[in-house]
Amino acid sequence: EFQPADRLDGIELSEIVRISEQAARLRAQGVDVIALSTGEPDFPTPSHVVEAAHRAAIDGQTRYPATAGTPTLRSAIATEAGARPENVVVSTGAKQVLSCAMMATLNPGDEVIMAAPFWTSYADMVSLAGGVPVVVSCPATQKFKLTPDQLEAAITPRTRWLLLNSPSNPTGAVYSKAELQALGAVLQNYPQVWVISDEIYQHLSFVPFTPFVQAVPELAERTLIVNGVSKAYSMTGWRIGWGIGPAELIKAMVAVQGQITSGACSIAQAAALEAITAPQGLLAERRQAMRARRDLVVEGLNAAGLECAVPDGAFYVFPKTHAKMATDHEFCRFLLDEAGVALVPGRAFGMPGHLRLSFAYATESLQEGMRRIADATAKL
Ligand code: PLP
């Protein structure tokens, strides 16, 4: 009989994947389902980026790339960040950057502090690497953000990382410069604690965005910045992300990557290079489009009795479940069955009692989704 390794205990098929599969099953049965459940922009990858990939393939950029990333992409990322190429690792998505960081640094029992609600994968990545996720609850009343007092209370001698994500998946919360500085001030007293700042939604901020290292330059020597092309450039399938941090950390992460995947796809790296070095006008255009969608869903959800704050970034809203429905997953089930709308229950992000809706979909789908949610909740 097949026995998975102990390290898989408690690691589940992501709830987001499960919802998407359920929606696909219903669709296959002929039910007209609107899925507002995945974190993926509906825009196409820009055509000049696709063309750069063609060129790279035809030019013969088809061999094993350097493990840490192609020299041109590493340099471009470093230049943009005011860092050096040895401070940069390119990986198969931001997801692999995070995983490699965990595997390269955590010993069994080492702790990683994360603010709930958090992106589902964080806790599992830490556990898979033998670490212990330390989850701090940050409810809507504090705008889903970690406070300096909470951070201080969560730190122990075993704390290795504070994992920050701004703009946040699933809440859209964005930390201001002052808020980052207040967290940084706490960390000044705990030199054993390093910071991961996951800034993958940087270009989808509707308020001024402050990179962590800009707010707290004095912690740069123990900060890993995570970013990538998936969300900003609609390149989720190309699987390119990167980490920027102290050279010794990057070296350790490259060692891990070298034994797991080697360098990320050479053709996708050429495409990513084009994405970040070509004129960037499209970022503002897409941000504007997302902002209009945000306003549409915030209004629609509140009108349907789902209390929903206005997010400052990313492409998610995180409303409360309907007052007449007991739990978030029952309410999601209800919406799927009654309205044919797929959302993700908040418990998948460490905060039950909420739902996550992604508004990275066409306006017509969002309008139809809002209509259906309003009709279904009116029956409660
Ligand atoms: N970080 C956050 C907060 C995300 O929401 C996601 C994707 O959902 C990622 C990282 C992973 O991005 P990538 O597609 O580059 O692996």
Image: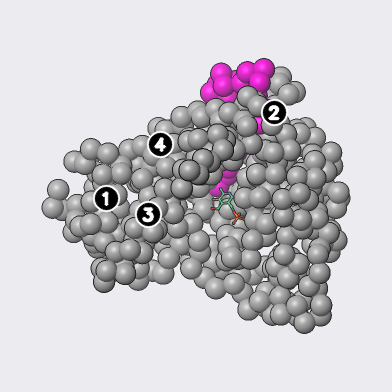
Residue 152 is covered by the magenta coloring: yes
Which residue carries the number 3 mark? 19
- Observer-side mark, 4 or 3, equals 3
| Pointer 4 with pointer 1, Cβ within 8 A | no
Vertical order, 109 against 239 (above or below): above
Which residue carries the number 2 mark? 107
Q: Residue at x 56, y 56 (%)?
A: 204
Q: CA distance from mark 3 to mark 2?
A: 33 Å
Q: Which x, y percent locates residue 72?
A: 84, 64
Q: Residues within 10 Å of mark 3 (few under 14, many from 20)?
A: many
Give the number of callouts: 4
Q: CA distance from mark 3 to mark 1?
A: 9 Å
In terms of sequence position, does the residue under pointer 3 or pointer 1 come before the other?
Answer: 3
- Observer-side mark, 1 or 2, equals 2
Q: CA distance from mark 4 to mark 3?
A: 17 Å
**Amino acid under disc 1:** Arg
**Please, what secondary structure does the residue beneath circle 1 have?**
helix
**Please, what secondary structure does the residue beneath circle 3 have?**
helix
Q: Residues within 10 Å of mark 1 (few under 14, many from 20)?
A: some
**Please, what secondary structure does the residue beneath circle 2 have?**
loop
In terms of sequence position, does the residue under pointer 3 or pointer 2 come before the other?
Answer: 3
